[in-house]
Amino acid sequence: MTYIPISPNERDAMLKTVGVKSLDALFDAVPQKHRFPELDLPPALTEMEAASLLSEMANTNENVREHLISFLGAGAYNHYIPSVVDHILRRGEFYTAYTPYQPEISQGTLQAIFEYQSLMTNLTGMEVSNASHYDGATATAEAVSLAFAQFRGKRKKVVMSPAVHPQYREVVRTYTQGMGLEEVGDDVSIDPEVEPDAMMSLVDENTMLVVVQYPDFFGRIYDYTKLVEDAHAKGSLVCIVANPTAMVMLKTPAEMGADVVVGEAQPFGIPLWYGGPYLGFFTTKKSYVHKMAGRLIGETVDNRGQRSYVLTLTAREQHIKRERATSNICSNQGLLALAAAVYMSTLGKTGLQQVANLCYQKAHYAATELSKIDGFGLCFSDPFFHEFVLCCPKSGSEVNEYLLDHGILGGYDLGKDYPSLENHILMAFTEMNSKQEIDTLVEVLKEME
Amino acid sequence: MATIVEPTIFELSSPGRLGVTMPASDVPTTALPPKNLLRSELPLPELAEVDVVRHYTKLSKFNYGVDDGFYPLGSCTMKYNPKINEDTCRLPGFLYTHPLQPIETVQGNLVLMYELQEWLKEITGFEGMTLQPAAGAHGEFTGVLMMAAYHKSRGDAKRTKMLIPDAAHGTNPASAGMLGFSVVTIPSDARGNVDLKALEAACDDTVVGMMLTNPNTLGMFDEHIEEVIALVHKCGGLMYGDGANLNALLGIVRPGDLGFDVMHINLHKTFSVPHGGGGPGSGPVGVSERLLDFLPSPLVDIIEDGDDEMEPLYGFVTPKKSIGRMKAFHGHFGGGLVRAYTYISMHGPDGLKDISQYAVLNANYLQAKLRSTYTIPYDRICMHEFVAEGQFAGSDVRALDIAKRLMDYKFHPPTNYFPLIVHEALMIEPTETENKDTLDRFADALIKIAEEAKTQPELLHNAPLTTPFGRMDEVKAARELVLCCWLPENYETLT
Amino acid sequence: MNVPSNLKYTKSDEWFDPSSGAMGITDFAQSQLSDIVFIELLVEEGDEVTAGKAIASVESVKASAEIYASAAGKVSAVNKGLADKPETLNSDPFGEGWMIKVAGGVAGDVMDAAAYEKDCAGRAH
């Protein structure tokens, strides 16, 4: 199979124009002893064969729509995606275009991303959104870079809550290993009685950023207003890592005074896709816009007086600022930002409120029913949105194994990251979970020996 | 007041209009959290489904993609994106698997990742491969982190200098900058190779390594590549390969065989993953043996060997001295890895070599056709792209004008003003998926534009004239900074 | 191109006024950068600067640049208003566009107006 639209005759004519005898003769600059290696790869398949092979591989998986009842979240959520989203995404004008460096013929991408920025600022309450980052974890790491740039390296401490997604904390550590930072706060010996404000004792005049999650990794809803005030009193910035579906219902991080609000927008129209590609959103205050990494679309006019959009403040970015740039990021998640925009527009205010409410209702119904089973209960007493920590009579891994034997994908085994939470699993509920599924879960757990 | 060609989704909103709605709740109702934890307003648009479809369909028509026509954007490899990839990556088994599922339930995904890893190793000649990085720049950052970790593990703390040729992409110095390394720029020689004397002078025991794109952004395969690598290795540095231009090398030469220690691969360039209007990309990174232990975690591997009756079990492992995790979860699985896997499986060894041979043929053909009209500052057999000067003696027409005028001829312009070492650069990469007729028409258009530059320069200064939008006021955008739009005033707050 | 004769100039296109202690970027520099949209001053009143130290970071629509001190001394004033009106650097680089003033400034490696003018002419493309 080939996608090369050149016939042998045309090839020969072209070689003649170039003035070489053969295709191989184009590569004389390549060291001879390494030229034209024999690649040990399987022979080429036709489209029909490839389609069949990939189908077979995909079918080897057990997926959460056809095989498993899923209560797994922990940063990736099984939501309904309206049909419209993929129809728009499949338009070749969108998905086969490059970064909109030529605005005259890229207004589709530019206006769509401008709308995405607007939707995200309206959702978070913040003033500015960039055109997106790779995912929620890298967006969080970029918040640290923003703070580092804002203080020009004069403050060196990041205080991270242990209730920030463990993988996000890992990514922050990977990203910042060249900055010489002190990263503290995420002591994983969790005591359910201790409030998140406790880590405020670590915030001092050297702190550049405090990072908390909302709702936190355990699903708890906290009002961080006081924490933000206290952090600001020490001169530190605050980053809130927020779940977009929860923000549809809950007080906005902006109302709490957050300086940066980031997160994972996968719940907004992007399939689980075994972890990616997803969509990291990044919003902040206008005063930090020059320290923000990533692309940014701004409104302007063209020379015919038409309202239009361009990439703006590009001198912040790597292709101009090179080694002095805040980040080396070059792409954004363009097509998925479009997906999120279409998702938010298609559901609209009402549809999104319905989604958020269903998530909340199902999770609370499940919590009530699960608490009735002997040996099970809610670990934390705080308000929660669509995830909560379930205390189990056995280790999380044992409970999950048992559930899987019954066709149920259980929650996230917290013992992996938090030694004190060995018998705890993080359960997630969305509009995709019917009452019947929840009842099945309860029945199966009741039978657990 | 500017004319509005298409209102924003907010301007199209009308209170009370419904799009897709959700089923009623089937569980007993629980009271919402206390009011002080709830938001007081939700300023999001309200539209019907048809409004949304028409709006985004209209916007799509303001775009130009590879499906619309020739897109010779240098160093971006805008090749045709096969449609079968769009189907395979949306198979339910891939779409609906959660990244944290037990490995026993996602063996299909893991086999795909493992095989793709092995294939990419075979294609590039590296010993190890991570699929985790989300894009080329992310892969670069991963690579530079590994280089830093390697030196650190050897107690070699004085290495702080990264050598980067003057033709490099901006991401190279930016990646080095993220680790606090200082950048030493190495000039190119008259034939577009790394200047060996300058390189030798810069090589000492403070060198972290060198970041080299080969073929470079001039489209030139470095004629002394082995000497370049030897010099860097001799002073204890590591050799980073920017794989942006890998489309010239499939089945031609393996960077690992040449001595590169680490290289990222842009699946969205070489392996036909669509660019998506700016992303998502996918940037796996290959490493030589000495960097294996530093690869990011987790990596896909066989964790239990199979036998006659049992398939092997695929799972995740963490390399011994891993730099850590580069992103949540495992990489751009659905959008990147499945498409690339589909593409490679349909090419095989010979098909891959064809890709690079025809990509190089097409570039050389265009170069040959344009040579008498445009100055080609580094004029020899090029690889998959070449750079011409977009300026003419005695004319005030610039590369930008030529680029914009090409739009009137229904072509996407080439990359312009890059690489920085060529004045008024036009960097042209046709890719292998264009036929001779298209290349001829494109060359004719450029030749005609050169003529217009002499006879009607104003035409070029004002171009494009036939596109839905004209040139934008970038200064206004940057000075006024309107970065989002808001709902019209009739919007109601929540009660 | 405007090159006031009472000022001293660096090779990297900053000026220094020995009489007032003020410094900033030259007319040539602002024209090369084109439309400036952002300036961040990197030093505060009371800081000691040495010649060649970065005192500001400037971004235009197309370019970005670090601005270096043209003289050493203790910073006696910084032009805080510039942040809100970065376009001043384009319209009046030697006047309202001054960046900082130093007390008892000692010029670094500088040249006079005639030499600077010659230097610019050599670099103009």
Image (cartoon, coloured by chain):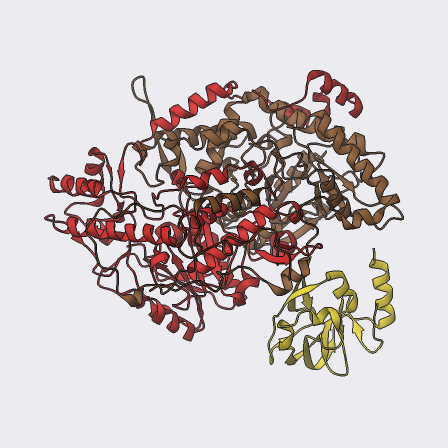
Chain colours: A red, B brown, C yellow
Q: Is residue C123 shown above or below A374?
A: below
Q: Is residue B63 visible?
A: yes
Q: Is residue B131 visible?
A: no
> At x 65% / y 28%, what residue is drawn?
B432
Q: Nearer the viewer, residue B66 or A405?
A: B66
> At x 35% / y 42%, what residue is drawn?
A80
Task: Estimate the x, y position of residue C66 in percent, counting from the top left.
Answer: 67, 64
Q: How many marks?
A: 0
Q: Nearer the viewer, residue B469 or A121?
A: B469
**Which of the 4 image quarters holds residue C57?**
bottom right
> At x 43% / y 60%, what residue is drawn?
B43
Task: Estimate the x, y position of residue B61 in percent, counting from the top left.
Answer: 59, 42
> At x 82% / y 37%, what residue is drawn?
B448
**Which of the 4 image quarters holds residue A193?**
bottom left
Position of A381 compared to B161: left or right? Answer: left
Position of A203 compared to A132: left or right? Answer: left
Task: Estimate the x, y position of residue B422 in percent, counting from the top left.
Answer: 76, 46
| Quadrant that contains the C terminus of chain B | bottom left
Q: Nearer the viewer, residue A140 or B463?
A: B463
| Quadrant that contains the N terminus of chain B | bottom right
Task: Estimate the x, y position of residue B471 in percent, counting from the top left.
Answer: 70, 52
**Which of the 4 image quarters holds residue C70?**
bottom right
Q: Nearer the viewer, residue A166 or B204?
A: A166
